[in-house]
Image (spheres, rainbow, N blue to C red):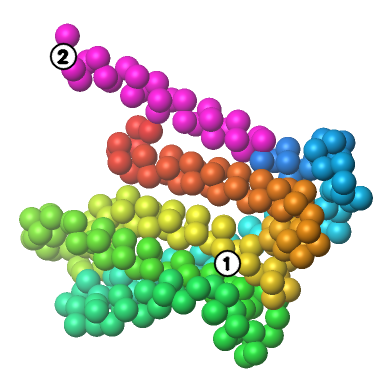
Amino acid sequence: MTEATVLAPPAAGRRRARPLLLAVLALVLVGLVLFMHELEPLFRAWFPDLDRPMYRRETFLRLTLDHVLLVLVSSAVSVAVGVSAGIFVTRPAGREFAPMVSALSAIGQTFPPAAVLAIVVPLAGFGFVPTIVALTLYGLLPVVQNTIAGLGTVPPATLEAARGTGMSRWQILTRVELPLAMRVIIAGVRVSVIINIGTATIGSTVGARSLGTPIIAGLVGDNIAYVIQGAAVVGLLAIVTDMAFEQVERRFTFGGRG
């Protein structure tokens, strides 16, 4: 019996267990979002010195939906801009701009989101817009880097064969390069989205409603229960999203077999 034979069954078992774990964690997340208020007796017992141990100014369902909207909009812009920029600098006409694009995309993570918010708020006001700008800039770098890296892994022989069949540049990009680079690109999108899920909480400091709202309220009011409630939902949301992206990546890695 070879070593590969010995190791294959446990590996296959772990792969099968991941979707089940994802489903369980997703159910726990939904339960917390919908029924967090049912845990008030637990938090009262846990923090007997607090008069109001349960955050009730907004429902956690509304906060989660607002948080997800922030992440979806900012991530959509980051992906659209990042993938487009990555494609552009890997074309012959755009290669000379590669250092500049990499430097510009890195600016978003060079400056902390709080600094970006401080710059944008006087120009765009409080609330949704400055938070979107900060999150978009913060999530841009991994998308750009992974798009460039993914397209760079396409074998030259494959591209030459595609040209030999008479395919146009657009057909080569959409039918050959992007499908082959998709696993690496998705990995960059995964990092960007997870970053934004955590970073979106800071939007509550400038009036954007998110899962950071109870966290900020708890920090300001010295109410650790609020902090735990907001952080628990944010953490689970990040874990579930990360595991969902892992399943998508695996389909590209294993040719759709999961």
Residue at figure coordinates x 81%, y 62% from the top left: 221
Type of amino acid at the residue the image marks with label 2: Thr
For this orientation, the residue located farthest to the right is: 51
* Picture quadrant of residue 199: bottom right
Type of amino acid at the residue the image marks with label 1: Val
Up-down: is 88 above or below 13? below
Whether residue 234 is visible here, answered yes or no, is yes
Quadrant of the snapshot with the C terminus? top left
Dominant SS of magenta comes to helix
Residue 169 horizontal/vertical position (percent) = 21, 69
Residue of label 1: 73
Secondary structure, mark 1, is helix
Position of residue 103 in the picture relative to residue 237 (left or right): left
| Nearer to the camera, 1 or 76 | 1
Residue of label 2: 2
Magenta region includes residue 22: yes
Up-down: is 209 above or below 38? below
- What residue span does the magenta drawing correspond to? 1-28
Q: How many marks?
A: 2
Mark 1 crowd level (few <14, some 14–19, many ≥20, 10 Å Cα): some
Residue at figure coordinates x 25%, y 52% from the top left: 180
